[in-house]
Amino acid sequence: MYHHTKNKGDLGVLKVKLDLYLQGFLILVPETEHAPFDIVIYKDGVYKSVQVKYRNLSKNGVLQIPFRSCYSTSKGAITKMIDKTNIAIYAVYCPQTDSCYYFDPKHFNRCISLRVKTSLNNQQQGIRLAEDFKKVP
């Protein structure tokens, strides 16, 4: 099924909202598209800003998540690194696994790779299993 980029983003936000609701969070939505985050979650007296991304699984079974945003203007495509100070949680929806993954982007440099499928050489060291990122930190 074909998904336009905006539709993918909308689907990612919907899936993340449902998953966070099932984890017991209250979901708050900003009144603008220009906020540096997509939603805010609240639980046990704590608010956290959340940036949501839709990412497809690579052929080798890895979710590659760069910390940047891309958008088009009349002058062409713009790529900008995210400001991690505005985001407490990165939430990633993967349609191939129909799962959401969560992490604090401040703990990583320019990107994070989450392994969904076992590597061909069965490497265990130095990898991050996607399964370990299914709950909000």
Image (tube, rainbow, N blue to C red):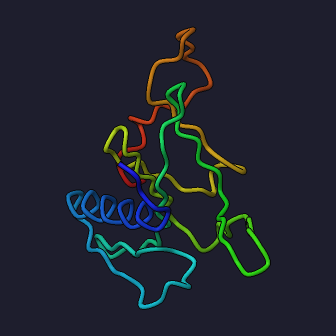
Left or right position of 48 against 27 = right
Residue farthest along the front direction in this orientation: 2
Image height of 31 relative to 12, above or below: below
Q: In the image as oriented, which residue stretches furthest toward the bottom?
A: 31
- 135 displayed left or right of 110: left
Report whether 65 appears left or right of 132. right
Instruction: Classify residue 30 by image quadrant.
Output: bottom left
Taking the spot 47% from the left edge, 89% from the top edge, the residue there is 32
Residue 95: percent from left, percent from top:
37, 45
| Residue at 41% in and 37% down | 132
- Taking the view exactly as shown, the residue that stands out farthest to the top is 121
Residue 96 position in % (x across, y down):
37, 38
Q: What is the count of numbered marks?
A: 0
Q: Residue placed at 72% from the left, 64% from the top?
A: 81
Q: Quadrant of residue 41?
A: bottom left
Residue at 33% in and 45% down? 99
Residue 83 vs 60, above or below: the answer is below
Residue situated furthest right in the rendering: 75
Left or right? Give the position of 74 relative to 61.
Answer: right
Residue 53's spot in the image, x, y percent? 49, 58
Residue 49 location (% of width, % of height): 47, 72
